[in-house]
């Protein structure tokens, strides 16, 4: 096996039918026990078919795969409170295992134009809280992205849109504002089963991170890179190793793959978890955390089941196909997308899901 211990990956994306099979092959090669697909449907209207695609991969994985759906958004702003609540209820009834949110990613936060603790979210969060339906939430981005001269070269290469500070396009809240808004959600919904993606980008402040973990017992982090976090861990190496040992039941393993360079990503991540080697990953200077067996097993494996049941929820394939039919009117309402391309994609993914459903007798 690739890893020292059995592994469940809570954070995987795929964005096309072509990469769906590659994702399944990757999961096999890595020897995962279970894995979780995260839909990006809320982030860009062009990912309209992503809930269906995640369901398709889950169906093909036959009991090994889980999937978190995302709420469909208008091109600007957020859906109405009633729409968000209804969508989340629907996804839960169709056999998704949780909800993926990205409203706190600065580009999306700028586009929606409302704070993350806006009251329109409350009925949805209350429902998620009452039902124990988990949410994996991408909030913020590495702090470097607010300072053009601190950004890594790979990000600079994508242009100034990715810079959230004064040198960029403007209109972004600060890192601190976004973080505070997210924490306010936990104050309003203390029982919400929430996982913040990418270590909530708080790896530069161990004391604050510890304070959050102690104050909000139903919140966890995933350790999906952001490689900048591993540079931060290396700077207070012993303190962070102790933190990982103390809070090992609150950190989940994720890779953010599939991508063309998934072997490098997962390889670096394994190295950072299991060894004490020094190396450079994606321009960040890492030092392996060399985590002990109990800590590793919690992060790699056990914590997945603290948020998710032992087996994935059964998929309602006819229900999913009926939901797929409703996407066409959403596509018709879009102004800035190639609507015909999106229609064809929804059709193709629906077809694939239908065939996968027939194979497994659903
Ligand atoms: Zn992600």
Image (cartoon, rainbow, N blue to C red):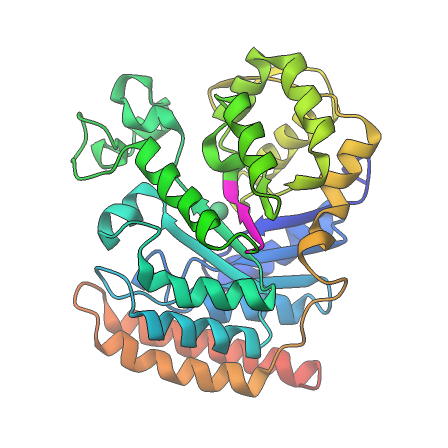
In the rendered structure, the answer to whether residue 170 lies left or right of residue 11 reads: left
Q: Quadrant of residue 78?
A: bottom left
User: Could you tell me which residue is drawn at 53 percent across and 85 percent down?
Assistant: 319
- The magenta segment is 192-197
Image coords of residue 222 (percent x, y) = 58, 41
Say which quadrant the C terminus sits in.
bottom right
Total tally of numbered discs in the picture: 0
In the rendered structure, the answer to whether residue 299 lies left or right of residue 14 reads: right
User: Could you tell me which residue is drawn at 51 percent across and 38 percent down?
Assistant: 198
Front residue of 212/339: it is: 212
In the rendered structure, the answer to whether residue 276 lies left or right of residue 5 reads: left
In the rendered structure, the answer to whether residue 126 lies left or right of residue 360 reads: left
Looking at the image, can residue 223 be seen? no
Q: Is residue 195 magenta?
A: yes
Front residue of 109/132: it is: 132
Image coords of residue 50 (percent x, y) = 45, 65
166 vs 109: above or below = above
Front residue of 41/239: it is: 239
Q: Quadrant of residue 247?
A: top right
């Amino acid at each position: 096996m690739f890893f020292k211990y059995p592994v469940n990956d809570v954070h995987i994306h795929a964005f096309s039918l072509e990469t769906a099979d590659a994702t399944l092959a990757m999961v096999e090669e890595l020897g995962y026990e279970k894995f979780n697909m995260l839909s990006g449907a809320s982030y860009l209207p062009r990912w309209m078919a992503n809930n269906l695609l995640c369901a398709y991969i889950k169906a093909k994985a036959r009991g090994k795969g889980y999937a978190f759906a995302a709420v469909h958004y208008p091109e600007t702003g957020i859906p109405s409170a009633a729409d968000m609540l209804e969508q989340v209820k629907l996804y839960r009834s169709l056999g998704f295992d949780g909800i993926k949110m990205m409203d706190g990613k600065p580009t999306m936060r700028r586009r929606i134009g409302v704070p993350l603790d806006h009251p329109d979210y409350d009925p949805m969060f209350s429902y998620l809280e009452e039902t124990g339906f988990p949410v994996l939430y991408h909030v913020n981005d590495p702090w470097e992205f607010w300072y053009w001269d601190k950004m890594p070269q790979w990000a600079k290469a994508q242009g100034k849109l990715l810079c959230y500070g004064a040198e960029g396009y403007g209109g972004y809240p600060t890192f601190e504002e976004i973080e505070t808004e997210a924490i306010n959600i936990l104050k309003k919904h203390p029982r919400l089963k929430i996982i913040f993606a990418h270590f909530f980008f708080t790896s530069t402040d161990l004391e604050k991170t510890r304070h959050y973990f102690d104050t909000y017992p139903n919140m966890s982090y995933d350790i999906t890179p952001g490689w900048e976090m591993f540079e931060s861990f290396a700077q207070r190496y012993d303190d962070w190793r102790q933190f990982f040992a103390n809070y090992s039941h609150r950190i989940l393993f994720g890779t953010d793959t599939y991508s063309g360079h998934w072997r490098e990503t997962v390889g670096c991540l394994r190295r950072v978890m299991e060894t004490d080697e020094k190396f450079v990953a994606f321009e960040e200077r890492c030092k392996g955390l060399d985590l002990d067996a109990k800590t590793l097993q919690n992060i790699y494996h056990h914590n997945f089941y603290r948020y998710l049941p032992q087996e994935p929820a059964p998929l309602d394939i006819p229900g999913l196909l009926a939901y797929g039919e409703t996407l066409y009117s959403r596509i018709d309402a879009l102004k800035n997308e190639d609507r015909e391309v999106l229609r064809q994609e929804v059709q193709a993914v629906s077809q694939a899901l239908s065939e996968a459903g027939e194979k497994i007798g659903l």
